[in-house]
Amino acid sequence: MIYNIQKFILFFISLILIIFYTIFGYYFFKQEEEISNIILKSLENNIIETSYKLAKSIEEKSDILNHRSLLDRISSNEDFIQAILVFDNEKLLLTTNPKIKTINRNLKNYKLNSSYEKLMNQEYIEEEITFYEGRNLRKLLLVFVFEKEEIYTHFVKNKLDFIIYFGLFPILTLLLLLIILRIYISKPLELLRQYAYYHNIVPKAFKLKELEAIRHSMVDSFTRLEAEKKELYLMARTDSLSGLANRNSLNEYLERLIPTMQRNEKEFAFLFLDIDHFKTINDSLGHNIGDELLKNISSIIKKTLRPSDFVARVGGDEFVIIIQDYKSYIELSNIIQRIQDYLSQTWLIQTHPINIGCSIGVAFFPKDGEDIVSLMKNADIAMYEAKKLGRNQYHFFTEELNETVQKVITLDKQMRQALIDNEYILYYQPKIDLSSGKILGVEALIRWINKTNKFVPPSDFIPLAEENGFIKELGIWIVDEALNQYVKWRDMGIDISIAINISAKQFLEKDFEIKFIEKLEEKKINPAKINLEITEYILMDKSDYVQDILNILHDYGVRISLDDFGTGYSSLSYLKKFPIDYLKIDKAFLDDYESSSGKIFLETIVKMGQMLKMKVVAEGIEEQEQIDYLKTISCDEYQGYYFSKPLNNEDFEKLYFNNLKDE
């Protein structure tokens, strides 16, 4: 059986206690017997001596009374004698204690083996007094009655002294020894055992020199072993040349990442990067130049990537990059393009200028592969496809996705360049009063006519601008252009309101309301003539923050329109909570005006708007019948191709002045 340190010490001390108390008990009882024997011998000698004295000094029975004082003196001087009695057969002749006049004669027949038993259980001892009365031999009985209480007290005191000095004191001493052993030996050894097993908490220095030497040796050994283990771990998972992760580390990383992505139903991009014409560099300049170039390339790739990305060198000039947490393929393409741009610089390696490029193949988990082997194979195929296309390019594994992404990337670049080249223009669609037919205002709508004079539909570039954040820059241009146009028209006598569509990202920009109000004040524009059109999706995000911004703008005087009303969520709660001036009914509901359910929906919106003191604007009106119906339900305004399609500023000016002539 194996014991731990504490159990062994406890067992050892318990064994010492058992041995000690066995010896203690033996000597205690032996001493008790010896003391009892001494007391009994003393009493027996005393009674024999007293009997002898009395026998020498009396001549007849009545003389015994003359020796009362002697017996009293003996009784008082002896602590263990309660009384001395003298009997003539059964007749009591004398007693030193009037309370005791008889004795139990049967007790002397008890067979008591030890002196202690005799002393504790026997009531008295007796001795004959033999004398001659004339020529006749007479006998009297001398009895010493024991003082039992004094005997008990004497032995109890001895027991207490023994227990205190030889019982309790050793226990306390051994307990103290146990505590000292635990503090200085048991606990340090246990800490060393835990440290040897878990290697987590390094024990502090010990008091005992020998244990401290063991601790110091263990700490030094484990520290060295841990350092060696880390070094071996890194060597097994780190590329010795570049310092990047190697293929082993890549496999371990993907073994952890793939299950996580499967649980969260997410994808990640697997990039296979190969340096173009690297073999030529090695052959012409030497492997030492190639190795130094690879080190520099590895450093640049690592710096270019984000903290959440992963890169490993898996071959001579081959790298694998794992990219996750990208919002769109555009963002992913920007990361890839950034890597290629950095690597396409001129490298100066030991006075040798070197120009390189890289081809990158992209596969996606899980649609292009659900394990390491398939992802590696498909990304490698895509990389070779990039090389076929002229090198220093990247290619997606599926041709369909590759074409789609390339189109999006091209559109993204053209869209941004278009703002620099002033290819955007605002068109204006009139808003008409249903009762009078008068133009009350316009909605500013962005249009893009590229360098080839080709019209690019807003449905093509607006969603992309929303996705990649370009909508914020575009939104600033729209606001400035619309406000400038208002000022021009105001100076021309065209006194109408302008509605400007504001995207969620633009609206939630820091200090949007402050900057917008500053522009109105700078251009001295009446805020009541400016109508900001927002969708319900803005109201869904950061509701309290949005409400504060809308309240500031509305209190300043800017009108607020809720566009596409009814197509979002919780519309009624928005009307109650936010300061809305106009409700714009989406075209989809107007197309259904002839059905009973469509009519009920439209009539409900108009009545609700009127009760909340809001203007209701119908969008997408294309037929006279729709106009007639809207008049019957008392709708306020409309806009659509029935009156006019969106127009550029010059065409709108002609339409406006013609509309005035027709009144």
Image: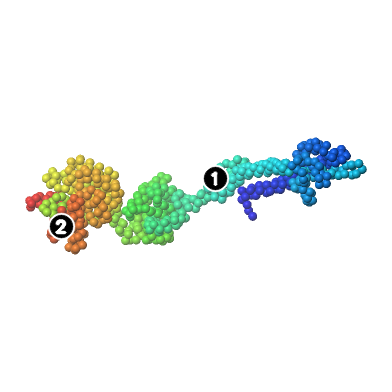
Task: Residue at 81% x, 40% y: name it.
Answer: 46
**Where does the N terminus fall, quadrant-wise?**
bottom right
Crowding near pointer 1: few (<14 within 10 Å), some, many (20+)? some
Task: Residue type at mark 2: give it.
Answer: Ile
Residue 235: image location, x then y, percent? 50, 51
Q: Residues within 10 Å of mark 2 (few under 14, many from 20)?
A: some
* Image height of 326 relative to 61, above or below: below
Residue 43, position as x, y percentages in the image: 79, 42
Colouring used for the render: rainbow
Name the N-terminal-most of marks 2 and 1: 1
Quarter of image, res 623: bottom left
Locate residue 56, reporting x and y percent: 87, 39
- Residue ID for mark 2: 633
Tally of marks: 2
* Residue furthest right in the image: 135
| Mark number, residue 202 | 1
Give the residue at x 78% y 37%.
72
Residue kind at label 1, given as amino acid type:
Val
Indicate which label's residue lies in the foreground, 2 or 1. Answer: 2
Q: Is residue 177 visible?
A: no
Secondary element at tag 1: loop
Q: Nearer the viewer, residue 58 or 304?
A: 58
Residue at far bottom of view: 595
Q: Is residue 572 left or right of 149 when viewed as pictured?
A: left
> How far apart are the alpha carbons under marks 2 and 1?
84 Å
Q: Position of residue 618 (x, y in %)?
A: 18, 55
**Closer to the camera in the image, 248 or 353:** 248
Residue sitting at x 64%, y 47%: 9
Q: Is residue 28 visible?
A: yes
